[in-house]
Image: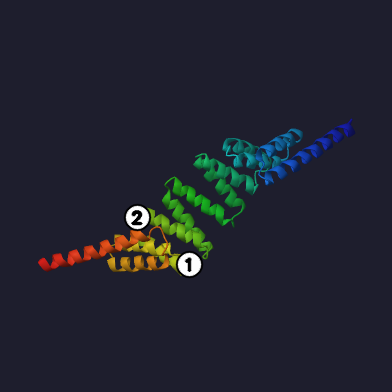
Amino acid sequence: MVNSLNNINNSSVSLAQTYFTQAEEYRINSQYKEAIDKYLHSILANRNNPTSYIGLALSYKNLKNYQKAITNLSKAEKLVPSDVVVQKELALCNIIEGNFEIGIKHLIASIKLDPENIEVQMQLALVHEMIQEEDMALMIYQKIIETNPDYIRAYIQKATLYLHSEDFLNCAKAFKQVLKLKPDYFRAYLALGICYEKLGNIRSAKRFYKKYLQASKTSINSTEVKQRLIEIEFNNKKAENNLRIV
């Protein structure tokens, strides 16, 4: 009797593996509907294989059926709660669905499991930006910069967040740091021009606008920046004339 049960179990596991292998091949070839069918057959034969649930979830995700992806990732999580991929994918799918608090919870779990994964840390900061928790986002960017001083994306995102928050002084400082690491990042010149103009330092604003135009001759912003320089010159001359009249 025991041998018969073992044979049945072994047969089920073997069948599940066959379906799983077929499903993986379909998924790799972007045949997601076919993959889903094989994953479901694999799970029917063996409900204790987390990789089948993960593959099924990723197939649903690629078809933009995020709710079903979350459902199957949650099943995988019960089997392998410490799996980094499961935690990361649960985070991303929940964020896409607008479940930001749940997404943040899974991102934090993923970071605890894999502290060296900078991309997940960046994702966490971006989610905090999305829900207007700018202070949390800035704190995460700064922590990334401290632990990974050559990771340029964190500097850029931090500087951009300062710009959107209209903290022009800190924005200027941050974009200067960006230029130290990446001198050819010409967008920084435009940001610095805007910051210095907002801060009333017109001479520096003009200098960085001109640097931007020199570095980005084909940029879609070039015409607008040229017009802005003309307006600045006009306003300066107008102010000088007013002074003479007085």
| Image point (75%, 43%), residue name | 21
Left or right position of 150 against 50? left
Left or right position of 217 against 104? left
Depth check: 209 or 96 in front? Answer: 209
Task: Give the image location of residue 240, x and y in percent.
Answer: 17, 67
The answer to whether residue 165 is above or below residue 241 is above
Callout 2 secondary element: loop
Numbered label attached to residue 166: 2
Callout 1 secondary element: loop
Q: In the image, what residue type sits under mark 1?
A: Lys
Q: Residue furthest left?
A: 246
Label 1, label 2: how many angstroms apart (C-alpha)?
Answer: 23 Å
Q: Is residue 246 visible?
A: no
Q: Answer few, some or many: residues within 10 Å of disc 1's Cα (few below 14, many 20 plus, some between 14 and 19).
A: few
Left or right position of 149 against 203? right
Q: Earlier in the sequence, mark 1 or mark 2?
A: 2
Task: Give the image location of residue 10, x and y in percent.
Answer: 83, 37
Image quadrant containing the N terminus: top right
The answer to whether residue 168 is above or below residue 3 is below
Q: Is residue 138 visible?
A: yes
Image quadrant containing the C terminus: bottom left
Depth check: 6 or 32 in front? Answer: 32
Q: In the figure, residue 43 lies in which quadrant? A: top right
Task: Give the image location of residue 56, x and y in percent.
Answer: 66, 39
| Image point (14%, 64%), residue name | 242
| Residue where numbered disc 1 is placed | 182
Task: Give the image location of residue 130, x and y in percent.
Answer: 45, 46
Q: In the figure, residue 89 lies in which quadrant? A: top right
